[in-house]
Structure formats: C-alpha cells, structure tokens
Image (tube, rainbow, N blue to C red):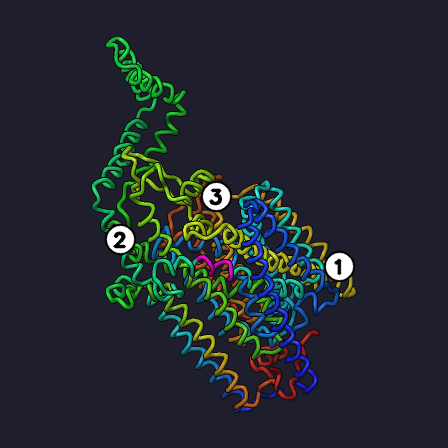
Amino acid sequence: MQLTQKHNDYWHKNLVVTGVLLLIWFIVTFVEAWYARELNGITIFGFPLGFYMSAQGSLAIYVAIIGYYAWYMQKLDKEYDVDEGDLE
Amino acid sequence: MNQAVSQSHSAFKSQLKKYYTFYAGGFIGFVILLAIAEQMGMSKQWIGYWFLFATIGLYAGIGVMSRTSEVSEYYVAGRRVPAFFNGMATGADWMSAASFIGMAGTLFLGGYDGLAWVMGWTGGYCLVALFLAPYLRKFGQFTIPDFLAERYGGNIVRTIGIVSAITCSFVYVVAQIYGVGLITSRFTGLEFGVGVFVGLSGILVCSMLGGMKAVTWTQVAQYIILIIAYMTPVVWLGTKHTGIPVPQIAYGYTLQKIGDLEKKINSDPKELEVRKIFTDRAAAGKAALADPDKSYAAGKAKLTDELAGLKTSNAPADKIAGAEKALAAYPKDVADAKKAWTRDTGLAARAAPVRPHAQPFPGKDEAAQNVARWNFIGIVFCMMFGTAALPHILMRYYTTPSVQEARVSVFWSLFFIFLLYFTAPCLAVLAKYDMFTNLVGSQFASLPGWAAAWAKVDSGLLNITDFNGDGIVQWAEVVIGGDLIVLATPEIAGLPYVVSGLVAAGGLAAALSTADGLLLTIANALSHDLYYKMIDPSASTTKRVTISKVLLLVVAIMAAYVSSQKPGDILFLVGAAFSLAASAFFPPLVMGIFWKRANKWGAIAGMAAGLSVCIYYMMRTYPFFTNMGVPKMDLWFSLSPVSAGMFGLPLGLVVIWIVSLLTAPPSKEVQELVEHVRYPHLKGDSVVSEAR
C-alpha cells in the first residue's frame, strides 16, 4: 500500500526516539566504562561511582530505557493510528 | 482485535497468574517441609535427591500437560504468551549455568573487570528492544532464518542463517549440559554421566512433547525456582553483614570495609612472609628448569648428603625421619621434577599483592592498563551485540500476542534478568568480606565449618595450605575456584543444608531452561528451515512436528556426547557463541529492518565476511587451535580472541552496505515487507505474513 505523510512522520519519530535512547545507552555503557577510573574518585553511599555504575547504575538505566521506549511507542501508535486495538 | 479475543486473552492471563502464584506458594511450602524433615534427621543425600527428582518431575509434568502437535503451538506457543510471563521465560532461557553459578565467582576473583559480563549480558536487551523485538513480532514467522529468507530472498541466505544458528546454539548448549552433569553429580553423589542423563531426560520430556508451548511454561516455573534460590542466601548473608534485608543497596559500606582490609592484608608481615615464599620458590623453580638434568642430580645429592650427615652425627631420630621423608618425596625422575618446577614457577602469580576489589583495569604500567580497558570494552561490545543476535532469545518474541506486548515483554525480560545480575556483584562483595573477617586469621586447627568441608570435597574449589607453618590462615594461602562462591554461600551464611539443596535446584533450573531453548532452536532450524522450507514444502503439519521431535532427540544426544568429553574452557565457549552470533546475525537483521536498500547479495556477502573474519581471528589466536597446529598470529589491537565479534560485526555492516549499493535494489514486494514490519498495524496492508 501507499504510505501517507502521516506514516512517514511516525517512522521518523520512531527513529528519533530510538536514536536518543541509543545515545543514552552508549554513554552509560562505553563512555562510563572508559572513564571508570576517573569516576571511581567520586563516592556515593560508600560505592566508588565507576564500580557502582557498572554493577548497578547502568543496569537500572537499561531497564528504564526499555520501559520508556515501550510506553512512548504505545502512545505514538495510538496518536498515528497504527495501533493494534485493545489487546491487553 | 475483536472483543471475544481480547476477553479470552485477559481471562487466560488471570488464570496464569493464579496458577503460578499457587505454584510459587507450593514450592516454598515444599522447601519448608524439607527444612522440617532435615531438623528431624533427613540425610543430606536424600535432600539432594528430593530436590533433583521433585523439580525434574515438575518440569516433565508441565511438559506432559502442554503436549501438542499443532504447528503454531509447537513453534511459537500459539502466540498468546503475555508480556509478563514471556519476560520470566526469557529470563530463565537467558540465564545459564554460567550466570547462576559462575558469575558471582568471576566477580569475586576479578573485581571490577568481571563487571564486563554483567554489563554486556544486560545492556544487550536495549538493542533487542530498540532494533529487533517489535519488528520481528510484526513479521510473525517461526524462526530467525525465516526472517532472513523472506527479507532477502533465496535459499543461500537461509542456509547461512541455518548454519550460523546451529553453530552458535550448539556451542552454547554443550556448556549447559556440562553444567547439568556437574550440579547433579555434586549434590546427589551420582556419577557425572548419570547426572547428564537424568537432567537430559527432564529436558527432553518437556520439549519433545510440547515444543515451544511446553518450554515456555516450564521456563516460567524454572525462573521462579532460580530467583528464590539465588536471593535466599544473599539476603540472609546481607542482613548479617549490613543489617538491612536489601543488601543490593547497602553493600557500598561493606565494599569500603573490604578496601581497608585489603590494605591491611597488603602490609601484614605474615602475608608478606607467605608471598616471599612464593617468590623464592618460583625463582628456584625457574633456575632449576634452566638445566633440569643437572639440577635434578644436584637436588637429590644434597638430600642424600644431608641424610648421611645426620646419620653419622647421631642426630635425633625425628630429624633423621624428616630427612628420609624429604628424600622419599623427591621427584622420581627428571620429567616429574620438571612438572614440579613448572608448578612452582606458577606460584609467582600468587606472590602479587591483593588488588583492590573496585579498581578497574589493573596493570603494571599505563600501557598494560590501557590494554585491560580496551579488552573490557571488547567483551562488553561482543556480549551486547551477541545478546541481540542469539536466535533462541529472539525467537521468544514471536510468542507474544501483539507488537506492543513484545515491546513490554523485553522490559519484563530485562527486569527479571536484572534482579539476578545486580545481586551477583553484591554477593561477591559479601562473600569476600566474610572470608576476610572469618577465614583470614583463623587457626588451621579450627577452620570455619564450611571451609573445612569444601576443602575436603574439592581442592579445585577451595585449597588452604599452611605455607609458612605458623598455624594461622593468611589470605595468600587460600586458593578459591569461582564456582565456590554461589555453591558455598548458604553454608558461609550459616544456613541449614536445605538451602544448599535449593541453590543446587536453582542452578539446575538455570542450566535446563537454557538447554531447552537452545535445543529447540537447533531442532527448529533443521525441521522448519531446512526440511520444510527447502526440502519438502508440501510436508503435512504432523510430519513437520514429528520430524522436529526426532531431531531434538538426535541433537540432544550429540550434545550430551560432546559434553561428556568435558571440553575445556566453558567461558570461552560461551563467549565464542556470542561473538559468532553478533558477526553473523546482527548486521543482516538490523539493516534488513532499517535500510530498505539492503539486498540479497549484500546480506550474503556481509554474513559470510562477518562470520569468516570472526572464525579466522579465533582460529589464529586462541591457544586451543594454535596448539593443534594452526599458525599463530599476533593479536589485532591486543584484543583477546573471545572478542572476535569486534571485527566481524563492523565488517559485516560495511560489506552489506557496499555490496548492496553495487547491486540492484530489492524488489517492490520486499520493500513493502519492510514497510509492513515497521508499523504495528497498517489499514489495508497487502502483505499478509502472519502465519497462524
């Protein structure tokens, strides 16, 4: 079928949110790990920050990234009328 | 979606919740009953048997109840697994024996550097969620090669897909079955081979009778067992040391105390004395190895002379006896002596001071530290992209009722995996603190109960030797095998044996559930992709399912045979599977969804290039292969062989891009298929790919 402008906008918005979340993922993974020694200079709740992020912090952010994406996309599906109806 | 379907879906969901709540309660009751039986005098071995047979019987029971020969039930559980339960099943599917038993030990021994595995095996789900799960669900077929074949067209792509899926799944399943044999033999006293067989029968009843449907519901049950088993001892130990029943939050202060204890150990004169002994013996061994024949003769002559001297000078009897013993213990020949000296040179590693637990990238100088950092990044990278490319995980997202449920399902998957993975670093720290305070400095005559017991059972897991003969345990005198941490934690925490049995049942659940998913992936690649799609497309549905069941049995037996040969380094096998999957699958899958222009020849060239480079690098650098005669080459950018995907994946992406642009664009139908998978629901969509 022929896609409308609305469909293209939906896909574009999907790409934007995917890109932004991917950037966050990249920062808390690779940038964080690269500078782990420097981050360890900061201490929170007794944890050196670099260790804390790799052991727990980044993991929790991963969960949040995926949760946000699922929530945002459901909203976007409805807004652009490409949702699957009430299958919950 | 109409009203009736929606209603039956929510009724199904509430029924599931009821069943599994009841089941979790029943399991806790079962553990409590066994605990009472233990107090009344049930032997350890019987507790082991009860856990083994009750849990395997349970999984088999679920398998029997979910038996099916319907194609869509067998391959994708009827596509009606709610997000929450699919998340649990994926969690169990994902967490293998290596995660459950090995992870905390790796962190205990490696400190910060072990966290590469933790990050890699969780962060990969971001890629699954953002790049793959919803689109694969919309595509809605049965296997991963299905998607590649449909998107790129032709049997060449499907064949490369089949070969890659089987290669990485088989490497991985061998490691799982090995774990099953290890756990059953350790906790019941059964022989390794018998243990493999018992565990395997549980896997087979389940997946043969009911395929994906049975495997899904069993994996949910297995997740519940493994998470209860992992948390119980950690919470107990954490409450003991931090005073808070959520040790994952509170162990930061324990980590600080460990830092102080590490400094104390590194300056303790007794510790220094032991480390000096190691340095000396390593140096002596190295010197002796320079000219083995001469040193052997000299060493023997020295002992003989001493004995003769003592005898002529009428020394006390115990001194003479001691010298006689030393002479008797001297290596029989030069070959034996060489082995002993080589062992001694290895002691040099133990002479190093304790490394701070939280310190990243250790190394003697800036260059060595940078190599360690680079390899940390390499492992994280390969594990993440491998996660997003392993067929047995991606397959699970075909089973949800809708695209949105698939997205939510990835969230629940990572949440359930996160529960265990963010506990493992905490367990490692608590166990270390306990050992620093209760084991170090204790008398050899009165070691803590668990230490004495484990040192006797298996010296590979725990070995304590009084090198300086002062009767007191120094940290340098303790050698720990990684698997000890999870297996011995219940005893370290002072819990009754029933909790040890629970932990073993949890480890078994982790290994069995992963093996289930992997075997099913292999059997499906053969029966669905190879037989039905390529050899006999007119085969009846009954025939397809029957063939899959037979293949499952054959593959299981082959995998059991390979693991009974006890192939070396498990962690390398697992890591290799991830690198292979990342190189072969990630580029064509993701480009197939996000770039319409990607075409058949690009995919073929890209997969072939990615896989070849990955395999080539491993063959030329990993000692297992180079020792077999493959010419050895230098590491590229000093990256270890396990991270070969770091070369394979980018190359795959670039090759797909270039070759696709050089050849004709894909047909209009394929471009429509790509549009089709990008939208959860398109009104008037002409592509109907949903196979029911």
Q: Amino acid at mark 2?
A: Ala
Q: In percent of the image, x 38 and y 22: which residue is there? A: B329
Q: Identify the secondary structure beneath mark 1.
A: helix
- Return the residue at label 1: B546
Q: Nearer the viewer, residue B39 or B293?
A: B39
- Return the residue at label 2: B367
- Return the residue at label 3: B625
Label 2, residues with CA under 10 Å away: few <14, some 14-19, many ≥20: few
Q: In percent of the image, x 42 and y 55: which residue is there? A: B104
Q: Amino acid at mark 1?
A: Thr
Q: Amino acid at mark 3?
A: Phe
Q: Is residue B610 above or below residue A58?
A: above
Q: Identify the secondary structure beneath mark 2.
A: helix
Give the quarter of the figure containing the C terminus of chain B.
bottom right
Give the quarter of the figure containing the N terminus of chain B.
bottom right
Q: Chain of mark 3?
A: B
Tell which circle, 1 or 3, labels the residue nearer the N-terminal end. 1
Q: Is residue B351 above or below residue B235?
A: above
Tell which circle, 2 or 3, labels the residue nearer the N-terminal end. 2
From mark 2 to mark 3, how far is it between C-alphas? 28 Å
